[in-house]
Image (spheres, grey):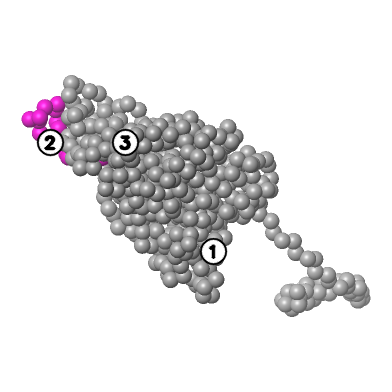
């Protein structure tokens, strides 16, 4: 305040001088007794409230979770549980996208946290010893991401941020019981990462308990969960149950022609502890068959065809259970390029160009972040600018090339080749003529042999 008065003093003197000069002669200007200035305590600025719709739009354009966090907290103080749940889910979805697309510049910094992880043999999990991270840039990095709602895990040789779902519990006063239960279910993986490096990181028995908790969530709250929340809960439950039945590459359920003893014991415990669940009803049928065969492998280990039949059958069992709670939404959307569009290694105009996507190509879009989209096309994964893509809804006219495929001038194997389409390219057929389909790709219109086209 003193500094302010000092700065204002010359201005006040100048103003006084001008006033005296303009006063009629003979009148001595007198100054009214001044009041001692009293500084009014400044009010803490509050975040301008935003609507749910505006907040959801911001999650598409924001560059950093800390841009959104104050607005989320403001929104959670207003409205009802429905808006609160939707805002929370929009923020969690943004955190997932940001962890993939917004942190490229900090990967090397994340790996500096690696020395502070300790493997807890009793729990069979990694523990980040936060208290041992020294003060400075690295601790500031950790604190910043923790504030956003992340924790860190060692995954496939690197340290990566993952959502800390205790963030949901921290805001439970504003959320519905279903949303709180969803957060608790997802928190299991925040506390102990369930799988990485092609293998389980938790015991099979614990995985079974996660299956049971996932089904309990869906049984009790399926009707009142928001669609996006239910979809994620159902997808997580499905992944758990699938691996529970068939294992992973580095932790198979069958070794040397027999069900692993710990898997057999886990199945028996599940049937004993959760007999009324839909999962147990399906598992009981499978367990009965295994038991009748002396727990021998239900397929021929040296036959890829037999293994494929087994996996297809197990997938049917998984779908029988998850189908009782709903149908999963396709996690991808689709867009058509309006120009020849660069596919880059990172969401950055200075990053390496992996591939140039021809104009008019339909691509898979996995996620959207601050004007960039993560794209899959022709076997490539990378990043492109959103503004050069037009949304597309796939219909029966869309197909995918199963291998590198010639686009010919006319519907004949002897016709000249106009261009070769890479495998896994999406195309839109204009019409079918016998064994051929007419399409346009890369500005050229021609014919593809239908035998080498599949459904996307």
Query: Is residue 105 shown above or below 275?
Result: below
Residue hosting label 1 = 144
Circle 3 sits on which residue? 293
CA gap between label 3 and label 2 equals 55 Å
Please report the bounds of the magenta region as a residue range.
Answer: 408-424
Q: Quadrant of the N terminus?
A: bottom right
Q: Which residue is mark 2?
A: 417
Callout 2 crowding tier (Cα within 10 Å): few <14, some 14–19, many ≥20 = some
| Rendering coords of residue 178 (x, y %) | 60, 40
Q: Residue at x 46, y 67 (%)?
A: 118
- Secondary structure under the numbered disc 1 in the rendered image: helix
What secondary structure is marked by label 3?
loop
The mark lying in front, picked from 3 and 2, is: 3
Which residue is the extreme one toward the left? 414
**Residue 138, position as x, y percentages in the image:** 49, 71
Which residue is located at x 38 percent, y 41 percent?
A: 245
């Amino acid at each position: 305040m003193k500094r302010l008065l000092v700065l204002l003093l010359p201005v006040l003197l100048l103003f006084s001088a001008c006033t005296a000069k303009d006063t009629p002669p003979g009148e001595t200007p007198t100054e009214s007794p001044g009041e001692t200035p009293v500084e009014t305590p400044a009010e803490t600025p509050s975040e301008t409230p935003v609507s749910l719709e505006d907040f959801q739009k911001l999650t598409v354009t924001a560059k950093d979770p800390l841009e959104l966090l104050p607005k989320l907290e403001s929104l959670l103080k207003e409205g009802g549980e429905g808006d609160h749940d939707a805002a929370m889910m929009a923020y969690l979805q943004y955190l997932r996208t940001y962890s993939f697309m917004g942190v490229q510049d900090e990967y090397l910094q994340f790996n500096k946290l690696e020395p502070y992880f300790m493997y807890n043999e009793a729990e069979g999990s990694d523990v980040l010893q936060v208290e041992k991270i020294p003060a400075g840039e690295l601790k500031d990095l950790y604190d910043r991401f923790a504030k956003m709602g992340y924790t860190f895990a060692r995954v496939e040789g690197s340290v990566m941020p993952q959502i800390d779902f205790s963030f949901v519990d921290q805001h439970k006063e504003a959320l519905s019981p279903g949303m709180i239960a969803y957060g608790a279910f997802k928190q299991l993986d925040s506390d102990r990462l369930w799988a990485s490096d092609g293998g389980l990181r938790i015991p099979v028995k614990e995985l079974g308990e996660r299956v049971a908790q996932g089904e309990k969530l869906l049984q009790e709250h399926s009707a009142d969960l928001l669609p996006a929340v239910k979809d994620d809960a159902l997808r997580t439950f499905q992944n758990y149950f699938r691996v529970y039945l068939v294992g992973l590459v580095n932790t198979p359920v069958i070794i040397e022609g027999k069900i692993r003893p710990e898997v057999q014991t886990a199945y028996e415990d599940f049937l004993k502890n959760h007999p009324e669940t839909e999962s147990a009803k399906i598992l009981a049928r499978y367990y009965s068959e295994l038991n009748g065969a002396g727990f021998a492998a239900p397929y021929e280990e040296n036959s890829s065809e037999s293994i494929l039949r087994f996996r297809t059958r197990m997938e049917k069992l998984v779908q029988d259970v998850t189908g009782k709670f709903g149908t999963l939404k396709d996690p991808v959307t689709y867009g058509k390029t309006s120009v020849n569009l660069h596919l880059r290694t990172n969401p950055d105009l200075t990053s390496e160009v992996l591939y140039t996507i021809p104009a008019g190509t339909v691509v898979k879009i996995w996620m959207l972040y601050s004007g960039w989209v993560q794209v899959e096309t022709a076997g490539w994964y990378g990043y492109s600018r959103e503004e050069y893509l037009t949304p597309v809804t796939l219909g029966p006219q869309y197909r995918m090339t199963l291998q590198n495929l010639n686009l010919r001038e006319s519907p004949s194997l002897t016709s000249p080749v106009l261009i070769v389409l890479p495998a896994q390219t999406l195309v839109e057929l204009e019409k079918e003529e016998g064994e051929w389909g007419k399409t346009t790709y890369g500005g050229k219109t021609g014919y593809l042999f239908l035998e080498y086209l599949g459904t996307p």
